[in-house]
């Protein structure tokens, strides 16, 4: 078994706040990220897949194919968007780094056969990154 990680970049804006909480509670939980005017990040998305090396190609995955899937299913939906209003899921879910990582996992899971999605890592700032490993795919 071998793992391969590809790194992608996208820029997006968000507000971290729940509409059903008051300003004090939103600020307590989300700090200045609750500012209703929003703010942006240059995100780095790392997608790790695992599986067996193809004996003919010597590769785990066809990287151009993986890149196209990530572009189509994740980057095209998030890049240069205001996540709270431009992405259906984030109309009801707060677009935290955690939830964006889960979004990417759900969008890619099962889409990169014969490889298996292993991990999503999302770097939001110099000081803030999350890793998500969802439920195991069927091998
Ligand atoms: Ni933020």
Image: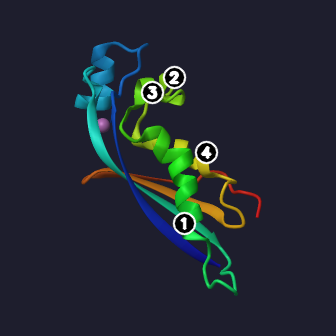
Q: Which quadrant: the N terminus? A: bottom right
CA gap between label 2 and label 3 equals 12 Å
The image's colouring method is rainbow
Where disc 2 sits, the SS reads helix
Res 59 → quadrant: bottom right
Residue 39 point in image, percent of width and height: 25, 32
Work out whether mark 1 precedes mark 2 in sequence or the reverse, and give the earlier one. 1
Q: Tell me if residue 100 comes above or below residue 9 in the rendering.
A: above
Work out whether mark 1 precedes mark 3 in sequence or the reverse, and give the earlier one. 1
Residue 45 vs residue 24, the one in the foreground: 45
Identify the disc placed on residue 92.
Answer: 2
Where disc 4 sits, the SS reads helix
Q: Which residue is mark 4?
A: 106
| 10 Å crowding of disc 3: few (<14), some (14-19), many (20+) | few
Residue 25 vs residue 69, the one in the foreground: 69
Q: Which residue is mark 1?
A: 64
Work out whether mark 3 precedes mark 4 in sequence or the reverse, and give the earlier one. 3
| 10 Å crowding of disc 4: few (<14), some (14-19), many (20+) | some
**42 on left or right of 92:** left
Residue 80 point in image, percent of width and height: 36, 38
Work out whether mark 4 precedes mark 1 in sequence or the reverse, and give the earlier one. 1
CA gap between label 4 and label 2 equals 16 Å
- The residue sitting at 64% across, 83% down in the picture is 57
Q: Which residue is mark 3?
A: 86
Where disc 1 sits, the SS reads helix
Q: Nearer the viewer, mark 1 or mark 3?
A: 1
| 10 Å crowding of disc 2: few (<14), some (14-19), many (20+) | few
Residue 12 point in image, percent of width and height: 34, 38
- The residue sitting at 25% across, 23% down in the picture is 35
């Amino acid at each position: 078994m071998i793992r391969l990680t590809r790194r992608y970049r996208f820029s997006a804006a968000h507000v971290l706040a729940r509409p059903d909480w008051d300003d004090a509670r939103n600020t307590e939980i989300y700090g200045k990220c609750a500012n209703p005017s929003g703010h942006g990040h240059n995100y780095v998305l790392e997608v790790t897949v695992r599986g067996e090396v193809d004996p003919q190609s010597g590769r785990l995955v066809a990287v151009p194919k993986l890149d196209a899937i990530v572009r189509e299913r994740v980057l095209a939906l998030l890049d240069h968007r205001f996540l709270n209003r431009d992405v259906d899921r984030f109309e009801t879910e707060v677009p935290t780094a955690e939830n964006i990582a889960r979004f990417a996992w759900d969008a890619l899971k099962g889409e990169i056969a014969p490889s298996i999605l292993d991990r999503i890592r999302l770097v939001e700032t110099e000081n803030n990154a999350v890793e998500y490993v969802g439920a195991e795919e069927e091998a």
